[in-house]
């Protein structure tokens, strides 16, 4: 299934054919946007060597470009025609269907299609939405699609949305994803000494680069914190730098600001993006000396449900009333 507002990557048919041959019993997602949880899972896969990321359980399945086994395609068509299912968004319906039938869902890294910026026949207006890592923007080894490497299911994801950085963490007992701010997460990982360093780096950057007010300390600090956490989690899982990570960092920056009113074409973003590489490497170096973060068996109900961050405004902080430092 391809929606009307997609741009196909080069050699699309060949890449899809190889993917279907490698994973004939899986639902294959060929696009995921730059600021969803599935996009965060793809970013982590980029750093940890996976050509495919497992879809995040509980989040909608991106349907912009989707390849299903024949039986599932027929099942989705049959069940989707009912009046009850017709009321659901297509991506939510597909997610529920695939989870109910127990079908594994994999997301390609890089994405094989890009989201076009023009209008869609669906009439959705959610602001700029682009690929977390589009194939046209990266260089791949000649035999890249011959690999069948699949990343392990993610339970802790670096996440930047509406200018705010943190992690979304799976509370295994309830299946609820929780949001933990970047400062609290650094406390949990035992690198709280980096909080002031990241804040100092952000203030220094704002002064030296003379960024516009819309890129003030709050925005820059959260972007730096988000890049550090991305590297920190990747490092704790044996991750490393590569060209896919570079593209994913750029889209983490752009996607993390895409619903804030910030003009994405602004030249100041280039300078911020360059600094994010340094912050990511700092996080990676710290992560290599630490075990992968684990929350198994822990109650996380003191943290807000991650789905709630979709409704926050840029200036809101879901943990503002808590003592974070």
Image (cartoon, rainbow, N blue to C red):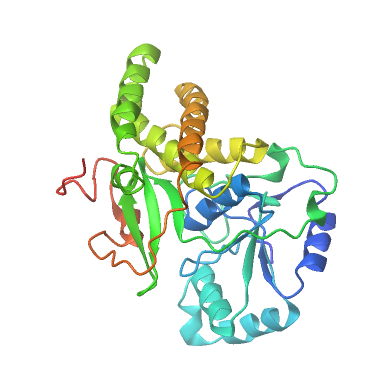
Residue 250 falls in which quadrant of the image?
Answer: top right
Q: Residue at x 57, y 82 (%)?
A: 80
Compared to residue 140, the image places residue 237 above or below, namely below
Residue 174 drawn at (x, y percent): 35, 74
Q: Is residue 103 left or right of residue 184?
A: right
Which residue is at the far front? 289
Q: Residue at x 41, y 40 (%)?
A: 226
Q: Is residue 87 left or right of residue 237?
A: left
Where's the N terminus, which quadrant?
A: bottom right
- Res. 318 visible in picture: yes
Front position in the image: 2 or 208:
208
Residue 235 drawn at (x, y percent): 52, 43
Q: Residue at x 75, y 79 (%)?
A: 70
Residue 30 drawn at (x, y percent): 67, 58
Compared to residue 188, the image places residue 96 above or below, namely below
Residue 3 drawn at (x, y percent): 64, 61
- Res. 126 visible in picture: no
Q: Residue at x 58, y 61 (%)?
A: 152
Where's the C terminus, which quadrant?
A: top left
Compared to residue 20, the image places residue 93 above or below, namely below
């Amino acid at each position: 299934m391809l929606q009307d507002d997609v741009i196909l990557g080069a050699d699309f048919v060949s890449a899809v054919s190889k993917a279907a041959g490698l994973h004939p019993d899986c639902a294959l997602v060929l696009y995921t946007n730059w600021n969803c949880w599935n996009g965060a899972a793809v970013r982590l896969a980029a750093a940890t060597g996976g050509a495919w990321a497992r879809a995040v359980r509980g989040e909608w399945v991106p349907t912009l470009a989707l390849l299903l086994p024949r039986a599932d395609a027929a099942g989705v068509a049959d069940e989707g025609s009912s009046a009850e299912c017709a009321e659901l968004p297509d991506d939510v319906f597909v997610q529920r269907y695939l989870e109910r039938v127990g079908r594994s869902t994999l997301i390609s890294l890089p994405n094989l299609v890009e989201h076009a910026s023009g209008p869609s026949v669906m009439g959705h207006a959610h602001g700029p939405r682009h690929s977390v890592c589009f194939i046209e923007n990266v260089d791949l080894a000649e035999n890249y699609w011959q690999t069948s490497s699949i990343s392990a299911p993610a339970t802790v994801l670096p996440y930047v949305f509406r200018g705010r950085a943190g992690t979304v963490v799976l509370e295994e007992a309830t299946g609820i994803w929780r949001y933990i701010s970047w400062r609290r997460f650094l406390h949990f990982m035992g690198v709280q000494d980096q909080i002031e360093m990241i804040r100092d780096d952000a203030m220094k950057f704002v002064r030296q680069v003379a960024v516009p007010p819309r890129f003030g300390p709050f925005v820059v600090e959260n972007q730096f914190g988000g890049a550090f956490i991305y590297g920190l989690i990747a490092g704790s899982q044996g991750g490393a730098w590569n060209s896919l990570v570079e593209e994913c960092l750029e889209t983490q920056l752009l996607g993390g600001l895409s619903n804030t009113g910030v003009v994405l074409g602004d030249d100041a973003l280039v300078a911020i993006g360059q600094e994010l590489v340094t912050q990511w490497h700092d996080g990676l170096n710290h992560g290599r000396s630490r075990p992968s973060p684990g929350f198994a068996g822990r109650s996380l109900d003191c943290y807000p449900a991650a789905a709630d961050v979709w409704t926050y405004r840029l200036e809101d902080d879901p943990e503002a009333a808590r003592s974070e430092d």
